[in-house]
Amino acid sequence: MAATLCPIEEKWSGAIASLLRPPPPLQVQEYFDQLLFDRNCSSIKVKQENDFGKGVYADGDFEEGELILKDPILVGMQHSSNKFDCLVCSFCFRFIGSIELQIGRKLYFQSIGVSANGGCDGETFSAVSKDCYDAGFSHMEEDSHLRTHENLENCASSSSSKDNIPVPKEVVDSLMNGGLVLPYSTEFPLPSAISCPGGCKEAFYCSKSCAEDDWKLSHSLLCTGERSKSLSREALSKFIQHANGTNDIFLLAAKAICFTISRYRKLKEDYLKEQEKCPSANALDRSDLSLLLEAWKPISFGHKGRWWDCIALPDDVDSSDEASFRMEIRELANTSLQLLKAAIFDKECEPLFSLEIYGHIIGMFELNNLDLIVASPVEDYFLYIDDLPELKKKEAEIITRPILDALGDDYSVCCEGTAFFPLQSCMNHSCCPNAKAFKREKDKDGQATIIALRPIGKGEEVTISYIDEDLTYEERQASLVDYGFECKCSKCLEEQP
Ligand SMILES: [Zn+2]
Ligand SMILES: [Zn+2]
Ligand SMILES: [Zn+2]
């Protein structure tokens, strides 16, 4: 199979090389010092060790259990399949709506046979999510059920809801439209869901500021609503459909590209304004490429290699088929890129639309430790009911028990996604780490939260485990292949055969 030639790669080879060149150590240091300063985080430092990459070091003492760092997301997304289980803010990933709406949506999707466990193609996904919008935020029409059923005929249905005892459709409806208020749900208030200002009915937010920030940062280009700034909403829908049907990380790669384009446009605007103000004083004549490099900088610290080169070979692919497997992955990325290009191409940012850059962006999300998890308030709610004094509990359970039975075993699924955390991604792995990513009760959004596992002294490196550190030596080394390194931590050196 011949590799597809990427014409942009030939035309922009110099620019692409500049984008992919590791930033000089001084620039790295400046960037992270500024980032830590902006985050009001004075007790850690990012250090660049020439050949060994970056690391995070304690710049003060930490006690066991102490918060080391909160790291906001640079770009992130909720996995497509998880959207059936959790309604969260598309920007900060906080749960939104109400306990009733969270439960009602989940029961609604169960009733029509979709859940996180049931695979779904992109078209069905977007049809269903649009239906859910209608269902959750206006009164549901009888025929929207029927329409969705037709859409779902070819879609794998849920396997987990078989043993659940469904509640009547009227109950599901009134959970979603606010007609039914569950006992004690006011103890778990959630921010109301704000629709996307672009009118896509697919993105929702916890606040106006999240909606505005997401719009500015990337969503204006990726919105399928009538106020979309994309070149073609139809092309955009095709791209989204392809990603939902193949690998939803393409959606995150698109966000990273839009993030860079938006930053570029802002930098260019500021630069032109500056030039207009005092044209003579401007000794620094900035080219479009230098602005693009500046816009790309936050991403430039994250990428490590091309997706198709770095992805671990799946168990069911024979090693003799490795070359054609990698070629297929590359072709898949190329198909996705061409669909994205038709939707949001920007001539001034053309190098971003090369397969080389796209491959590195996707690789960045596959090669870093990037799980985005937010615990569900639905779990807390049912635990609260379970902990009530006997009499109150009995009374509440008259209403909540049938709902819990209908939800079944997976009654509370976390918000799950992938995100790039600029500081957490600098933390190196150890199989006997001194810190871990851990959400405390008060951590309700998608930010990474790093907590000390034992006392850490000033100057010590802060490490986390990318994998389950209780695995055997061989299993650990095998799991770490995905991250592209061989672990030489003290535990591994000790257990090495
Ligand atoms: Zn939010
Ligand atoms: Zn939108
Ligand atoms: Zn190790």
Image: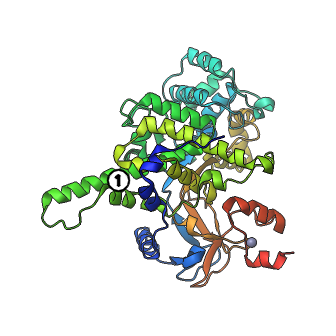
Where on the picture, by quarter, is residue 248? top right
220 or 268, nearer to the observer: 268
User: x, y percentage for residue 137?
Assistant: 49, 29
163 or 214, nearer to the observer: 214
User: x, y percentage for residue 85?
Assistant: 63, 39
Q: Is 18 displayed left or right of 494 in the figure?
A: left
Where on the picture, by quarter, is residue 105? top right
Q: Amino acid at mark 1?
A: Tyr
358 or 326, nearer to the observer: 326
Find numbered disc 1 in the image and state the secondary structure of the residue it sits on.
Answer: helix
* Residue plotted at (64% across, 46% down): 381
Question: Alpha-carbon neighbours of circle 1 within 10 Å: few (<14), some, or many (≥20)?
Answer: many
Residue that badge 1 annotates? 264
User: x, y percentage for residue 221?
Assistant: 40, 40
In the rendered image of this protein, does residue 120 appear above or below residue 146? below
210 or 312, nearer to the observer: 312
* Residue plotted at (48% across, 56% down): 74
Q: Is residue 257 visible?
A: no
Q: Quadrant of the C terminus?
A: bottom right
Q: Is 81 displayed left or right of 281 in the figure?
A: right
